[in-house]
Amino acid sequence: MDGDYSFIQMKKNEPIHIHVQKGDFEGKFWIKIEEILIEEAFCYNFTPAAKREIKKIIYQHFDLIVDALFKNLTNPENGEIE
């Protein structure tokens, strides 16, 4: 299970998380910004090695992911998170 994962950002009004998908594999990871921590919510069909790879990718791009999440959730008119 090499590369080419799809990372999908969270929706509004939900705890911070991302969805990960590749073929028949699907997972959800909680992102705890204050602790700089990633926790597995669920993973279907992922091997332990694939889970480690996903966490590694998320950690490598942690700041980029967090910035993108807040950018997508911030109202451009007032700067508040919706």
Image: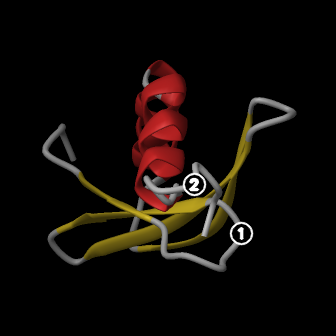
For residue 47, what is the image quadrant? Answer: bottom left
Circle nearer the viewer, 2 or 1:
2
- Which percent across, then down, holds residue 9? 40, 61
Q: Which residue is rendered at x = 43% and y = 28% of the image?
A: 64
Q: Which residue is rendered at x = 58% and y = 49% of the image?
A: 79
| Amino acid on which disc 2 is placed | Asn
| Amino acid on which disc 1 is placed | Pro
61 vs 12, nearest the viewer: 12
59 vs 63, nearest the viewer: 63
- Which percent across, then down, holds residue 10? 48, 67
Q: Which residue is mark 2?
A: 78
Q: Which residue is rendered at x = 46% and y = 69% of the image?
A: 27
Question: On the rendered structure, is 40 left or right of 47?
Answer: right
For residue 48, above or below residue 15: above
Locate the C terminus and report the quarter of the image it occupies. bottom right
For residue 18, above or below residue 12: above
Q: Which residue is rendered at x = 45% and y = 46% of the image?
A: 71
Question: On the rendered structure, is 22 left or right of 57?
Answer: left
> Tag 2: Cα neighbours inside 10 Å, few (<14), some, or many (≥20)?
few
Q: Which residue is mark 1?
A: 15
Tell me how far mark 2 sits from mark 1, CA to CA: 22 Å
- Which percent across, then down, holds residue 68? 41, 42
**Which is more N-terminal, label 1 or label 2?**
1
